[in-house]
Amino acid sequence: MRIVVDYNMEEVQNIRIDSALYLGDYAVRLQFNDGTDRLVDFKPFLTKSVHPSIKKYLDEKHFSNFLIVDGNLNWNDYDLIFPIWDLYQGKID
């Protein structure tokens, strides 16, 4: 099986999160450096995960404590992080 991803690597390397606002119920509004604005719902990902290191983020106090590090969302010193391109597209699995 061959997986083909259709994106420009230069584009991906230049995409950064400028701001992130936690709205509640595991939804985060992201503003990217190219002006793109996305609302990302992390709830489906968190609720279907069975791994304890991810399930702990179902505590909203813990989940809402993220930082922007090097242009990406980062929880607890890289304990939880997502590919920037997935966040940019507004889809996480």
Image (cartoon, rainbow, N blue to C red):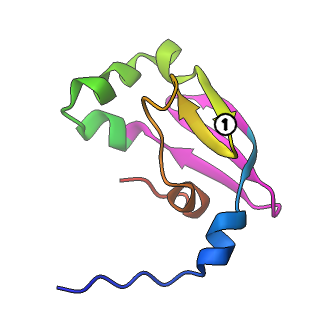
Q: Is residue 36 left or right of residue 55?
A: right
Q: Does the segment drawn in magenta span residue 24?
A: yes
- For disc 1, the neighbor class at 10 Å (few under 14, some 14 to 19, many from 20) is few
Q: Is residue 69 above or below residue 76?
A: below
Q: How many marks?
A: 1
In the picture, residue 57 is in which quadrant? top left
Q: Identity of the amino acid at label 1?
A: Val
Q: Whole-percent x and y of residue 53? A: 29, 25
Residue span colored magenta: 20-43
What residue lies at 71% left-to-right and 54% top-to-bottom? 16
The residue that label 1 is drawn on is 69
Front residue (pair 12, 27): 12
What residue lies at 72% left-to-right and 65% top-to-bottom? 14
Q: Does the segment drawn in magenta span residue 36?
A: yes
Q: Is residue 38 left or right of residue 56?
A: right
In the picture, residue 43 is in which quadrant? top left
Assign a secondary structure to mark 1. Answer: strand
Q: Whole-percent x and y of residue 73? A: 60, 39
What residue lies at 47% left-to-right and 47% top-to-bottom? 82
Q: Main secondary structure of the magenta part?
A: strand
Q: Whole-percent x and y of residue 49? A: 24, 37
